[in-house]
Amino acid sequence: MAILDRFSIAGRSAFVTGAASGIGLAYAQAMAEGGAAVTLADVDHAGAEREAALLREAGHEARAAHCDVSSFTAVAATFDDHAQAYGGLDICFANAGIDAGAGFWNPAGHRNPDGQVDTYDPARWDRSIAVNLNGVFYTVSNAVRIMKQPGRANGRSGGSIICTASNAGLVTEPIVGLPYMPAKAGVLHMVRALGLELAEFRIRVNAIAPGPFVTNIGGGWLKKDPVARAAWDAIVPLGKLAETEQIKPLALLLASDASDYMTGSHVVIDGGMMLGKYQ
């Protein structure tokens, strides 16, 4: 097989959570542009439908689904709909995530009264874990259920699951809300465990650990505050925050047969932030 052919996902189907905007939308666009039929799943159903319609207008096969990843039954029903529409599932991005609020330091290096462990809102903790960790488990569990089913439409076996982790799951980030870090660390360890568990079924599980990307998380404040954006650009070793377009090639690599000997791993994409300049 020619090397570029190994990156082809034509004729496969993909499911992406948190796909109405940001990194999830970039994943969905990459899958569609690569030739896969894709379900854009998001709690923002209108946003997901808008983006799916744009993909269809561009000649791709795409559909939208309402999905709150904090509900196992809702996730299961959405996966069943995808499998019925496309005859199975080949690729899944467990991506949906939410901001966990401010950390114990603010970007100026001062203590944040609402971000201390003794003042942190337990309801916010529970919601962050429900989406950022439980939601990944619910998504992966249902993806595996579909991927294990015999008689899939394209005759393929196995599949590729990609979970969105974070630099904050690997190092301490004092400006990040407390529950976000253990949730993302849990995602990374789940990926390692599932890589081993699912290898027998040719289901690969890997993680992408993004650093500073400009997305809508946290209310999209970096899009609105040029001073904060410039300050962040200045501390990235490669010179600026990433745009979501820059994650598409990595998504295609992990979704395709080009990574067929990778499982249980994570790939950092952060402009060099973890190399010491930020810490």
Image (cartoon, grey):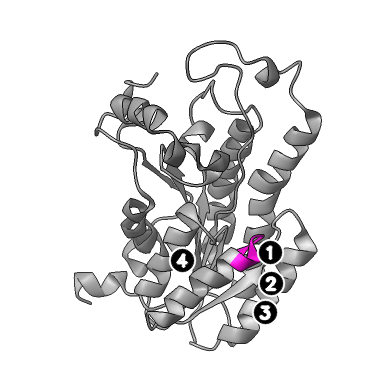
Give the CA distance from mark 4 to mark 1.
Answer: 15 Å
Residue 45 lies in the magenta stretch: yes
Give the CA distance from mark 2 to mark 4.
Answer: 16 Å
Mark 4 Cα shell of 10 Å, populated few (<14), some (14-19), many (≥20): many
Would you say 88 lies left or right of 25 here?
right
The amino acid type, in three-letter code, at marker 2 is Thr
Which residue occupies the extreme left position in the image?
A: 2
The amino acid type, in three-letter code, at marker 1 is Cys
Q: Residue at x 47, y 15 (%)?
A: 108
Dots 2 and 4: beta carbons under 8 Å? no
- The location of residue 25, given as percent across then percent down, is 47, 60
Seen from the viewer's position, the closer of residues 219 and 241 is 219
Give the CA distance from mark 3 to mark 2.
Answer: 5 Å
Which callout, 2 or 1, points to the residue nearer the camera?
1
Residue extent of the magenta highlight: 40-46
Q: Earlier in the sequence, mark 4 or mark 3?
A: 4
Name the residue carrying label 1.
67
- The location of residue 260, given as percent across then percent down, is 38, 64
Residue 18 seen: yes
Which residue occupies the extreme top position in the image?
A: 110
